[in-house]
Image: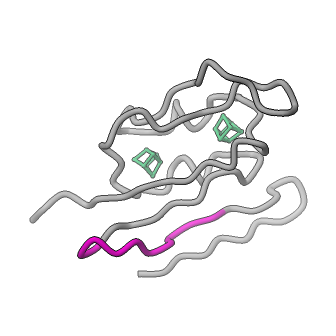
Amino acid sequence: MAKAKGDIVIDIERCKGCELCIEACPQDALEVSRQVNKKGYLYIVKVEDTCTGCESCALVCPEGGVTVYRVQNKKKTQVAQVKNITSDINITVKE
Ligand code: SF4
Ligand code: SF4
């Protein structure tokens, strides 16, 4: 069976550069960028096209800054977004 293909979008203005998502990614797809966001944090970028859409990065992000997609037949489907983890957790999972 073909390996799952995923993609993520990081809300760089929410990112605080804690690097939890980098630690959580089993595909080593994420790195700290060399640029800062408006709050002065070095934000995270996807550097490798190895994402499987496993959702680990979204689940550990304390800022709810990562949205995960799975790519099927070249069509992206959102599978996870964790919002505002300090007061509420809202996980959307679609297959
Ligand atoms: S969804 Fe999984 S594989 Fe993709 S960037 Fe996040 S942790 Fe890495
Ligand atoms: S876990 Fe969230 S806040 Fe922390 S570095 Fe990754 S995207 Fe930024």
Q: Quadrant of the N terminus?
A: bottom left
Vertical side of 59 occupied by 13: above or below: above
Residue 83 at x, y percent in the picture: 75, 62
Residue 60 at x, y percent in the picture: 63, 46
Q: Quadrant of the C terminus?
A: bottom left
Left or right of residue 22, residue 13 in this image? right
Q: Residue 47's image quarter?
A: top left
Residue 9 at x, y percent in the picture: 56, 53
The region drawn magenta spans 72-81
**Residue at the top extreme, as displayed:** 34
Vertical side of 48 occupied by 69: above or below: below
Vertical side of 65 occupied by 48: above or below: above
Say if the magenta span includes residue 13: no
Left or right of residue 43, residue 56 in this image? left
Name the residue: 54% across, 35% down. 45
Residue nearer the viewer, 44 or 26: 44
